[in-house]
Amino acid sequence: GAVVSQHPSRVICKSGTSVKIECRSLDFQATTMFWYRQFPKKSLMLMATSNEGSKATYEQGVEKDKFLINHASLTLSTLTVTSAHPEDSSFYICSARDRVANYEQYFGPGTRLTVT
Amino acid sequence: SQQGEEDPQALSIQEGENATMNCSYKTSINNLQWYRQNSGRGLVHLILIRSNEREKHSGRLRVTLDTSKKSSSLLITASRAADTASYFCATSGNTPLVFGKGTRLSVIA
């Protein structure tokens, strides 16, 4: 099946620093990628949708200047958490849609961000 | 939004028993998917059922879909301690997958 990777799997950073998370579709082209956020014992909440070569569409309540999304190629999207604060600590999961395989959506393994 | 809502929110059963989780959603869908997530881990795709299907099986999993009631159920038969996890349904229309709140299943050995 289609594989989506995320890097890093875990990251600890200090308040005020920025962290970049990469999401790659390994064996398919993803014109659309999604970023989700999950708090402990909660469900996944969609943060934004990114289309290759265009600006991301953010869900209501998600600060686009804080969560910078870049989808520069058909296999790579990045999420940068800028000026991170402890409340940004969360599990971030990316997902990629395979335009060939009937637009199936595949998920990465997630990135655990801890801001100290 | 077409967020799925699972019930129960938490379920505790003995090993060997069957576990049934339900999911309701609000709008028309192309398909409905069930995922599993172990604590602190990523999502594992379990099964996808399309809007024109009523039932699907995969190993010990059985999923039903009732589009008239906008509901789905996931049945895990002969549960094992290793089935302990959170289970989410996710619905797909022409939009990104939207997840329900999940059911936390505990299987006691």
Image: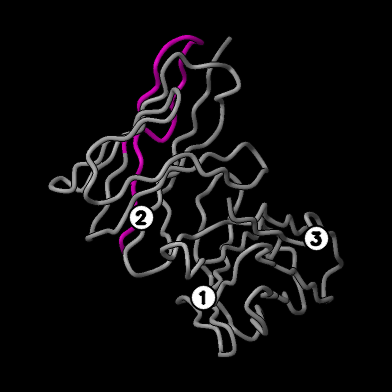
Q: Is residue B82 above or below residue A5?
A: above
Any mark on residue B91, and which?
2
Quadrant of residue B75 within the rendered picture: top left
- Find residue A101 and report its horizontal and vertical position in percent: 46, 62
Q: Which residue is mark 3?
A: A8
At mark 3, the secondary structure is loop
* Nearest to N terminus: mark 1 or mark 3: 3
Does any portion of residue B21 appear in the rendered image?
A: no
Task: Tell me where the magenta segment starts and ends, as one range.
Answer: B1-22
Any mark on residue A31, and which?
none
Quadrant of residue A35 within the rendered picture: bottom right
Which chain is indicated by disc 2?
Answer: B
Mark 2, residues whose alpha carbon is within 10 Å: few (<14), some, or many (≥20)? many
Does any portion of residue B45 appear in the rendered image?
A: yes
Q: Is residue B105 left or right of residue B71?
A: right
- Find residue B60 and report its horizontal and vertical position in percent: 44, 22
**Same subunit: marks 1 and 3:** yes
Amino acid type at image mark 2: Thr
Q: Residue at x 74, y 63 (%)?
A: A86
Q: Which residue is mark 1?
A: A49
Q: Residue at x 12, y 47 (%)?
A: B68
At mark 2, the secondary structure is strand
Amino acid type at image mark 3: Pro
**Contact between labelled residues 2 and 1, with CB atoms less than 8 Å apart:** no
Which chain is indicated by disc 3?
Answer: A
Quadrant of the snapshot with the C terminus of chain A: bottom right
